[in-house]
Image: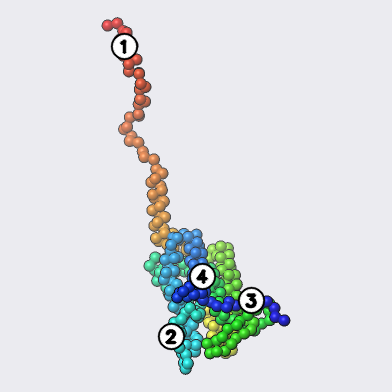
Amino acid sequence: MDLAYIPSPSRGVLNLGPIPLRAYAFCIIIGVVVAVWLGSKRWVARGGGRHTVGDIAVWAVPFGLVGGRLYHVITDNQLYFGEGKHPVDALKIWEGGLGIWGAIAFGAVGAWIGARRRGVPLPAYADAIAPGIALAQACGRWGNWFNQELYGRPTTLPWGLEIDKTLPDGTVVHGVYHPTFLYESIWCVLVAVLVIWADRRFTLGHGRAFALYVAAYTLGRFWTEWLRIDEAHRFFGLRLNDWTAILVFVGAIVAFVLSARFRPGREDPDAIDPQATEERARTESAAAEATVEPAQPRDAAPAQPAQEAGDAPAKLSKDSEKPS
């Protein structure tokens, strides 16, 4: 007897007339909004401006989307190129397929451009945005649920994911599988909580919060990648993404250790966002001028009290009584 497993959506697109609203895109958009919101709060708390994270995200997000898609197309080129394939499908990002490794790498390039334009040090910005990126990934993974993709091995666990779909080649997939999208989404939330806690507890700076996020994420990604059964390139028995996770994990640990050794502590709040520092200085200067009382001139005589009405006539009447 089958148990009540996690169902998959019957469709991932809602058509409003000629306009298709795709759940995969909505999940990505929600993730971007969450990342910018949380990153802005953390950036302001560190002494930065309210709009800095959003201004830099204008550069980072498009670069990240392009990089994520390029990584997917390059590493899964067999899906788009070859006999019977349609290369134009490589442009259909709404159908799924974003590699986080390419998204982070290219997104960092876009963030670097935006940070230079604002005069902001990239490591400080990366530390502020790191938990938000993890939460954005947690949101984005739900797009895989709507597309019924990237699931794991068959399972009889009560939280198994029921898949019922037809592949482009006509193959029908029906069964219950590990919900790797859910595993990774939960893991990303835990990574965000870990980074926020560690940042508060140890006052991480100079890119160490971001390095911690990368190292923690790759641990969970290695495990979920091991469970997945979708087609992928393998080397020495491991999927390509597993090898990538291992290399990125080692790089993140090395970066964390070197940063802690050569640049301990955290950046000076007045040095991370020059525009915000100038705005604060102008605001404080204007507030100080408004509270200063105007000084009286030294030579000014003290003000004499005004004579009450009727004083002068009274004096005249007394003078008139004196004998002449």
**Residue drawn 53% across the image and 66% down it:** 204
Which SS class for mark 1? helix
Furthest toward the top, the residue is: 323
Q: Residue at x 43, y 85 (%)?
A: 88
Front position among marks 3 and 1: 3
Distance, label 3 to label 4, CA atoms, is: 23 Å
Residue at the disc numbered 1: 319
Which amino acid is tagged 2?
Val
Q: Which amino acid type is marked by label 3?
A: Ile
Amino acid tagged 1: Asp
Do the CB atoms of the residues marked 3 and 2 lie less than 8 Å apart?
Answer: no
SS type, badge 4: helix
Q: Which mark's residue is nearer the viewer, 4 or 2?
A: 2
Q: Are marks 1 and 2 in contact (CB under 8 Å)?
A: no
- Badge 2 is on which residue? 88
Q: Is residue 144 left or right of residue 299?
A: right
For mark 4, what is the residue? 31
x, y percent for residue 270: 44, 59
- Ranked by sequence position, the earlier of labels 4 and 1 is 4
Q: Which mark is residue 6?
A: 3
Earlier in the chain: of badge 1 and badge 2, it is 2
